[in-house]
Amino acid sequence: MILAGFFQTVEFFVIAALSAAAIVAYMCMPKSRGEAVVHTVAGELSAGDGGDGEEPELLVEVRDDGAVVLTRSGIEGITASGAVSVAATVCGFDMNVEERRMRGFSNDARIDKARFVLDFMAPEWYHVRYANSDTGEFCSFRLHVKPGIKMRRRLKR
């Protein structure tokens, strides 16, 4: 009888309310996306068809071996002695690709294309954001890493 009286006390209801709040707080916690991993990939430079006036765009292709090839066209102000690379930050299935440039010597041949091979992606759906903070150009898209996928995205400012 004394034990049954405990269920009607203020202390019991305070403990029950705190326990319920702890369970709700635990259930509302977001799932962990894991660590962010940064991959740096150097680009293969080439001169394109249109020269410096070409519209900036990104061609995305998934090869048969599962590697993703990004071909960036419309790059301005880079010569053959320069460099273009990307830093791809992957967190879960979100990927932020930041383009980095180094101009090169002014008397060298001009280039306007760079090709990057990303061989670290799993065959899943990714949310991708490609950007260059120096020029303000960017694009965003969803990518299913599946052989044969090919898409073009125009870079906006």
Image: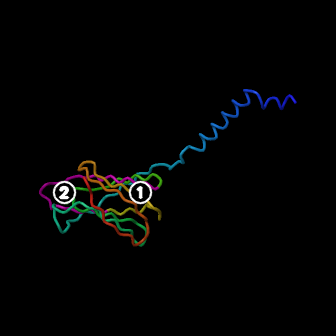
**Residue 68: x, y in percent?**
38, 65
Q: Nearer the viewer, residue 94 or 109?
A: 94
Q: Amino acid at mark 1?
A: His
Q: Nearer the viewer, residue 148 or 64?
A: 148
User: Looking at the image, which residue sits at the far right?
Assistant: 1
* Mark pair 1, 2: CA separation: 27 Å
Q: Going by the image, does 83 lie left or right of 31? A: left
At 42% from the left and 71% from the top, the residue drawn is 147
Q: Amino acid at mark 2?
A: Glu
Instruction: Residue 76: give its label.
Output: 2
Q: Which span of residues is magenta-colored?
A: 93-115
Q: Main secondary structure of the magenta part?
A: strand
**Residue 97: x, y in percent?**
35, 54
**Residue 87: x, y in percent?**
35, 53
- The residue indicated by pointer 1 is 127
Q: Quick check: 62 above or below 92?
A: below
- Kindly indicate the quadrant of the structure image that contains residue 115: bottom left
Q: Secondary structure at mark 2?
A: strand
At 44% from the left and 51% from the top, the residue drawn is 37
For label 2, count other residues whose C-alpha is less than 10 Å away and answer few (under 14), some (14-19) or many (20+).
some
